[in-house]
Image (cartoon, rainbow, N blue to C red):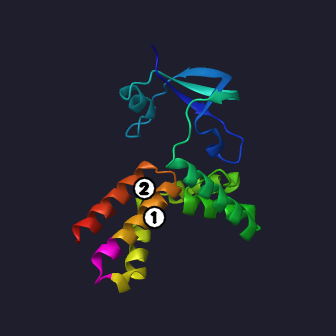
């Protein structure tokens, strides 16, 4: 048995359309490439240590069925993400601005203009467009200020903040960095009790 990392080039507006779907397609298999520069992160070596033996680049694919149903937790957030995309499209006429706003708020980089993405990559700042723990920290500070009138009612304050933090985590698709930060701030909020 061989474990391969599969890369899929998606031309749809969002990856949300493929969640839970089975796909078949054609592409090419490559060996894991190691870095040729000293002191540079060796992604090929990292993949080997993670149990992968090759990479597969999928060129063309088609949806052949459904692997699993979207759970009760995911479905409302997928609908909300689509709702936000629609609202951004209506409110922002410039598609490039729409892509940046979408990336910063809900973590969806599918509408990000290629030239803008390349500019961020060349500047070494593409990580700014990834929703991360920093966004959760900013949200936490905003909630602390917004709900400051509730500080004397600690249980209500904690419940409101926890709800908004976990709602945002679900809205962004639960990336690991957001989950880590949400758990951390949840522990802080509960510990303040």
SS at mark 1 in the image: helix
Residue 57 in sight from this viewpoint: yes
Q: Quarter holding the N terminus?
A: top left
Q: Is residue 157 magenta?
A: yes
Magenta span: 151-158
Above-or-below relation of 131 to 66: below
Image marks 2 and 1: residues in contact by CB distance under 8 Å: yes
Label 2, on which residue? 178
Drawn side of residue 56 relative to residue 50, left or right? right
Q: Is residue 109 left or right of residue 73?
A: right
Q: Mostly what secondary structure, the magenta segment?
A: helix
x then y, percent, for residue 100:
63, 62
Measuring from the top left, give residue 18's x and y in whole percent: 63, 38
Q: Mark 1 points at which residue?
A: 135
| Left or right: 188 in relation to 141 | left
Q: Which of 137 and 124 is in front in this view?
A: 137
Q: Can you tell which quarter of the image residue 76 is in?
A: bottom right
- Nearest to N terminus: mark 2 or mark 1: 1
**Structural distance between the alpha carbons of marks 2 and 1:** 8 Å
Residue at screen point 56% across, 37% down: 69
Whether 174 is drawn above or below 162: the answer is: above
């Amino acid at each position: 048995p061989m474990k391969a990392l599969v890369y899929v080039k998606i031309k749809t507006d969002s990856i949300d359309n493929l969640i839970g779907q089975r796909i078949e397609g054609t592409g090419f298999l490559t060996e894991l490439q190691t870095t040729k520069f000293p002191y540079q992160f060796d992604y090929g070596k990292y993949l080997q240590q993670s149990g992968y033996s090759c990479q597969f680049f999928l060129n063309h694919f088609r949806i052949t069925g459904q692997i699993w149903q979207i759970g009760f937790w995911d479905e409302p957030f997928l609908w909300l993400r689509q709702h936000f995309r629609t609202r951004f499209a209506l409110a922002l006429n410039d598609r490039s601005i729409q892509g940046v706003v979408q990336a910063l708020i809900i973590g969806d980089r599918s509408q990000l203009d290629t030239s803008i993405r390349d500019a961020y990559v060349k500047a070494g700042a593409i990580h700014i467009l990834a929703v991360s723990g920093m966004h959760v920290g900013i949200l936490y500070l905003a909630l602390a200020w917004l709900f400051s009138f509730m500080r004397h009612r600690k249980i209500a304050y904690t419940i409101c903040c926890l709800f908004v933090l976990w709602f945002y985590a679900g809205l962004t698709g639960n990336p690991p960095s957001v989950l880590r930060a949400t758990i951390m701030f949840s522990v802080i909020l509960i510990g303040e009790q």
